[in-house]
């Protein structure tokens, strides 16, 4: 039976909690600071574009050659004002989904991705967040975050 490994093998500097289910066929990644703000320029020369990347390698264990794994970016939130945009890119082993948000967004979001076929020895999970604001509008701003990623072997 295919299961997730006990300890993530590689990670970037974003802090997270790794919750592995008792049967090791599901996990949840919880974040407290996976976010990007593009703050309004109030005389402090705020950058008009900000980004953040999270990467993690989770080993797969077991004898199954083929399987399907469902990934969900859950509890994401975005807010943008006039002239601001935000983008969330979620990738696992080269399969990618993108969510683009235009000006005046104020919503939660969810991204789903299914990895299926021949199973590699690991899941290479990557999240890229990008927020941008109109640099000619000093009150323009954007904010994007992800609170959890869930994965389950189906």
Image (tube, rainbow, N blue to C red):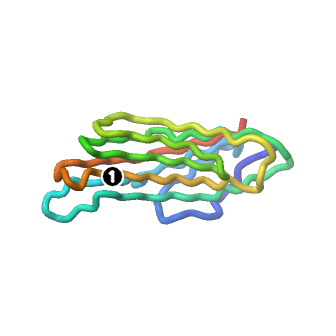
Pinpoint residue 26: horizontal percent, then vertical percent.
Answer: 65, 42
Q: Residue at x 69, y 40 (%)?
A: 69
Helix, strand or loop at label 1? It is strand
Q: Is residue 150 left or right of residue 139?
A: right
Pinpoint residue 112: horizontal percent, then vertical percent.
Answer: 57, 37
Judge by depth and name the residue closer to the eye, 13 or 141. Answer: 141
| Placement of 117 over or under 33, stated as above or below | above
Q: Quadrant of residue 5?
A: bottom right
Judge by depth and name the residue closer to the eye, 90 or 20. Answer: 90
How dense is the environment of label 1, judged by Cα within 10 Å: few (below 14), some, or many (20 and up)? many
Q: How many marks?
A: 1
Q: Is residue 8 left or right of residue 141?
A: right
Pinpoint residue 1: horizontal percent, then vertical percent.
Answer: 82, 43
| Placement of 11 over or under 100, stated as above or below | below
Q: Residue at x 36, y 34 (%)?
A: 107
- Residue denoted by label 1: 132
Q: Residue at x 77, y 53 (%)?
A: 120
Residue at the front extreme of this rendering: 136
- Quadrant in which the C terminus is drawn: top right
Q: Residue at x 78, y 45 (%)?
A: 2
Pinpoint residue 93: horizontal percent, then vertical percent.
Answer: 67, 52
Q: Is residue 37 left or right of residue 25?
A: left
Q: Quadrant of residue 64?
A: top right
């Amino acid at each position: 039976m295919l299961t997730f490994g006990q300890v993530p093998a590689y990670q970037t500097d974003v802090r997270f909690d790794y919750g592995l289910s008792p049967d090791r066929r599901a996990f949840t990644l919880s974040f407290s600071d996976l976010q990007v703000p593009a703050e309004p320029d109030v005389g402090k020369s705020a950058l008009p574009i900000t980004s953040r990347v999270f990467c993690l390698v989770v080993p797969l264990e077991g004898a199954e050659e083929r399987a399907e794994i469902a990934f969900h970016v859950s509890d994401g939130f975005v807010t943008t004002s006039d002239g601001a945009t935000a983008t969330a890119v979620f990738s696992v082993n080269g399969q990618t989904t993108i969510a683009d948000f235009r000006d005046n967004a104020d919503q939660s979001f969810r991204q789903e991705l299914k990895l299926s076929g021949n199973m590699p020895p690991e899941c290479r999970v990557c999240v890229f967040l990008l927020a941008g604001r109109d640099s000619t509008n000093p009150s323009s701003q954007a904010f994007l975050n992800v609170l959890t990623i869930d994965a389950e072997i189906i």
